[in-house]
Image (spheres, grey):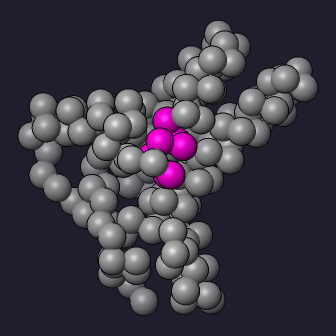
């Protein structure tokens, strides 16, 4: 099964996802600099909007869509299921960052943030989505994985 085939038959624009990853990475960096937990709440809210409600009304998704249009970047579609799993990983990272923040364990927060930033920036600069790669591996083992989501 090739990475380019639509595994859940829902396509998303990979360029918009990459812009979104850039904004997420920038917000995580701002959190690390300011230690303002409200940035993490905003990220959690945004991930919940994208994953479980309507991606079109997510603030980060709207900004990413606007910038893609502004720079006249062509569509490049990829499997939506893979990006959805990557988003679930992102939400998990944000929740872990919130927990580490309230436990006041800076080293844990920094470790989680570094892994999160590496994953996000790999997608932004190299178009290499770790969550997507994990999705394809799981789909090979469990072909019905995430069919109902």
Which residues are the magenta region?
46-52
Q: Is residue 109 magenta?
A: no
Height in image: 102 above or below 86?
above
Which quarter of the figure is the N terminus placed in? bottom left
Residue at (59%, 20%) from the top-left corner?
Answer: 39
Q: Position of residue 115 (x, y in %)?
A: 67, 43
* Quadrant of residue 68 within the rendered picture: top left
Residue at figure coordinates x 30%, y 66% from the top left: 11
> For this rendering, which residue is in front, 80 or 147?
147
Residue under the image location 31 percent in, 43 percent down: 56
Across and down, in percent, residue 122 comes to 48, 49
Residue projecting furthest to the top = 34
Which residue is more in the foreground, 91 or 57? 57
Q: In this rendering, is residue 39 above or below 120?
A: above
Residue at 43% over, 31% down = 23
Asked whether residue 122 appears in the rendered view, the answer is no
Give the x, y percent position of residue 117: 58, 38
Question: Eyeballing the image, is 16 above or below 97?
Answer: below
Viewed as shown, does residue 145 lie left or right of 67? right
* Residue 98 in view in this figure: yes
Magenta highlight: main SS: helix
Q: Position of residue 131 (x, y in %)?
A: 55, 61
């Amino acid at each position: 099964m090739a990475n380019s085939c639509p595994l859940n038959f829902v396509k998303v624009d990979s360029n918009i996802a990459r812009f979104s990853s850039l904004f997420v990475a920038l917000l995580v960096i701002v959190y690390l600099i300011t230690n303002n937990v409200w940035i993490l709440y905003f990220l959690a809210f945004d991930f919940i909007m994208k994953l479980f409600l309507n991606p079109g009304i997510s603030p980060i998704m709207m900004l990413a869509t606007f910038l893609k249009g502004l720079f006249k970047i062509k569509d490049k579609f990829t499997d939506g299921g893979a990006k959805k799993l990557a988003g679930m990983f992102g939400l998990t990272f944000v929740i872990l960052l919130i927990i580490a923040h309230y436990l006041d364990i800076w080293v844990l927060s920094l470790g989680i943030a570094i892994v999160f930033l590496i994953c996000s920036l790999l997608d932004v600069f190299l178009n290499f989505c770790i969550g997507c790669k994990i999705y394809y591996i799981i789909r090979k083992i469990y072909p019905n994985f995430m069919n109902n989501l």
